[in-house]
Image (cartoon, rainbow, N blue to C red):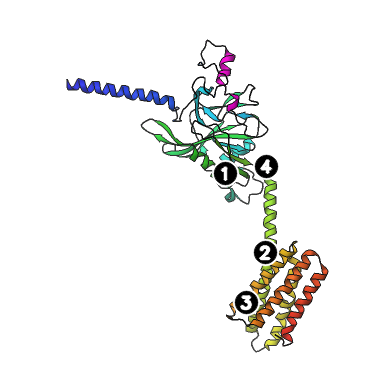
């Protein structure tokens, strides 16, 4: 008797489990994706007849009922085709599952290279493969999912399945899984990215979220040389794990990416030129100090005044020549760089020889030198001969004051 009761109980448990599994099958796809498909006659339908796609209706009526309504389409680009921002288990809005959450604007082939084999792609100016990095994505498999694309909201469109699938992580643990839907006509690729894990009790993947998947794609593509924009756009169509937002990532074409790299290199070159003036001034001041010490050690017993006479002309002529030759085009900026460079050189020189306190008159003398050199740099930058000449005269006069015993 007890054995029969146990047997009956086991049969009831198995039946209950099968019933729950059947219900779960309505909410999850074969690979564990959430369902939430729009019910018959729901807002995703193109027609309002409300019935299921039965065989008693004409083919045209069934086709219209399976298509999304015009108000449920979004346009990834201002000029281009329209997209239903969801995926479906079948070629009908009734099979709606997870929402598309990323759109990458750019040539579909270039987008695919960015995801699959970015180190092999020509990024028009990347210094090395290390600057690009290896892609974390690997080819993946999963259940077939469709989305709907049309040239115009009222026109006949087509159901397309994912062209390729990618994943980061192990199949039997947890991973980020993405399905890619390149535009049949247009420069964009829609992605459905989500996180999931393998459930051994269900023998399939269970989706844990769509937001983390979109953020992973954002972070992965953010640092590529060709990525020119990353933003989020609100289309207002929620449901199926979507709050109505799309992550939009723009990847420049090969020619545009080349122009961007050239512009970036030009900016770096300009910055290097900007640093050349203060760097040269610091090097001149400290170089004269180092040269004096070196020459004195090499020629022991030589009159120090003779050795000073060999190095001093470099200190007299070097800073004005550097200021005139290396001044950038902006006069105010040039004056500031000259003042910064000479001021830093003087401060470092005093620090190296251990001078902790500087008399006021010497401090004023150094300030006067800085002002004179700034005038030279500003005049050279503005192509103003009078200002340049005035700066040179001031420079020479301030240098002559100590020689005359006035400082």
Cβ atoms at labels 4 and 1 below 8 Å apart? no
Helix, strand or loop at mark 3: helix
Per the rendering, the mark at residue 221 is 1
**CA separation in Å, label 4 and label 3:** 50 Å
- Residue 158 percent coordinates (x, y): 60, 23
Question: Residue 277 at x, y = what percent?
Answer: 70, 67
Residue displayed at 73% across by 86% down: 403
Mark drawn on residue 275 = 2
Q: CA distance from mark 3 to mark 2?
A: 19 Å
| Foreground tag (4 vs 3) | 3
| Distance from Cα at disc 4 to Cα at disc 1 | 16 Å
Quarter residue 226 falls in: top right
Mark 4 and mark 1 lie on one chain; the one further toward the N terminus is 1
Q: Looking at the figure, which quarter contains the C terminus?
A: bottom right
According to the picture, the residue beneath numbered tag 3 turns out to be: 349
Report if the CB atoms under discs 2 and 4 are less than 8 Å apart: no
Precedes in sequence: disc 1 or disc 2: 1
Q: Which mark is residue 66?
A: none
Residue 72 in the magenta stretch? The answer is yes
Question: Where in the figure is residue 142, as x and y percent of width and height?
Answer: 48, 31
Q: Nearer the viewer, residue 17 or 204?
A: 17
Between discs 2 and 4, the one toward the N terminus: 4
Please name the residue that numbered disc 4 is placed on: 254
Q: Secondary structure at mark 1?
A: helix
At which x and y percent is residue 168?
49, 40
Q: Report the span colored magenta.
A: 54-79
Distance Cα–Cα, label 1 vs label 2: 32 Å
Q: Residue furthest left?
A: 1
Left/right of residue 356 with respect to residue 194 in the rendered view: right
**N-term mark: 3 or 1:** 1
User: Is 120 inside the magenta-drawn segment?
Assistant: no
Nearer-the-camera pick, 289 or 44: 44
């Amino acid at each position: 008797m007890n054995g029969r009761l146990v047997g009956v109980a086991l049969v009831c448990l198995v039946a209950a489990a099968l019933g729950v599994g059947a219900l779960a099958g309505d909410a999850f796809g074969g690979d564990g994706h959430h369902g939430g498909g729009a019910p018959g006659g729901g807002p995703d339908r193109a027609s309002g007849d409300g019935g299921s796609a039965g065989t008693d209706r004409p083919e045209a009526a069934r086709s219209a009922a399976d298509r999304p309504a015009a108000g449920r389409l979004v346009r990834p680009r201002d000029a281009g085709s329209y997209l239903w921002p969801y995926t479906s288990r079948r070629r009908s809005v009734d099979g709606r599952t997870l929402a598309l959450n990323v759109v990458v604007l750019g040539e579909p082939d270039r987008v695919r290279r960015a995801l699959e084999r970015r180190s092999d792609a020509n990024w028009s100016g990347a210094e090395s493969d290390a600057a690009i990095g290896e892609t974390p994505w690997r080819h993946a498999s999963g259940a077939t999912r469709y989305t709907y694309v049309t040239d115009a909201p009222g026109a006949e469109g087509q159901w397309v399945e994912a062209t390729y699938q990618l994943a980061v992580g192990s199949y039997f643990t947890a991973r980020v899984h993405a399905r890619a839907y390149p535009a049949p006509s247009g420069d964009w690729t829609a992605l459905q990215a989500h996180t999931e894990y393998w459930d051994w009790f269900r023998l399939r993947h269970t989706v844990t979220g769509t937001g983390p998947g979109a953020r992973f794609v954002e972070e992965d593509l953010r640092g590529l040389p060709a990525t020119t924009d990353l933003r989020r756009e609100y289309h207002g169509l929620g449901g199926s794990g979507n709050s109505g937002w799309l992550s939009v990532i723009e990847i420049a074409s090969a020619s545009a990416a080349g122009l961007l790299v050239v512009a970036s290199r030009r900016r770096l070159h300009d910055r290097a030129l900007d640093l050349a003036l203060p760097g040269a001034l610091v090097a001149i001041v400290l170089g004269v100090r180092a040269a004096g010490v070196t020459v004195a050690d090499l020629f022991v017993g030589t009159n120090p005044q003779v050795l000073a006479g060999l190095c001093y002309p470099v200190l007299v002529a070097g800073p004005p020549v550097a200021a005139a030759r290396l001044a950038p085009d902006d006069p105010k900026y040039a004056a500031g760089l000259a003042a910064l460079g000479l001021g830093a050189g003087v401060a470092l020189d005093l620090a190296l020889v251990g001078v902790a306190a500087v008399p006021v008159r010497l401090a004023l003398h150094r300030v006067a030198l800085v002002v004179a050199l700034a005038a030279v740099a500003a005049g050279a930058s503005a192509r103003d001969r009078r200002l340049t000449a005035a700066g040179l005269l001031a420079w020479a006069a301030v240098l002559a004051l100590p020689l005359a015993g006035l400082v």
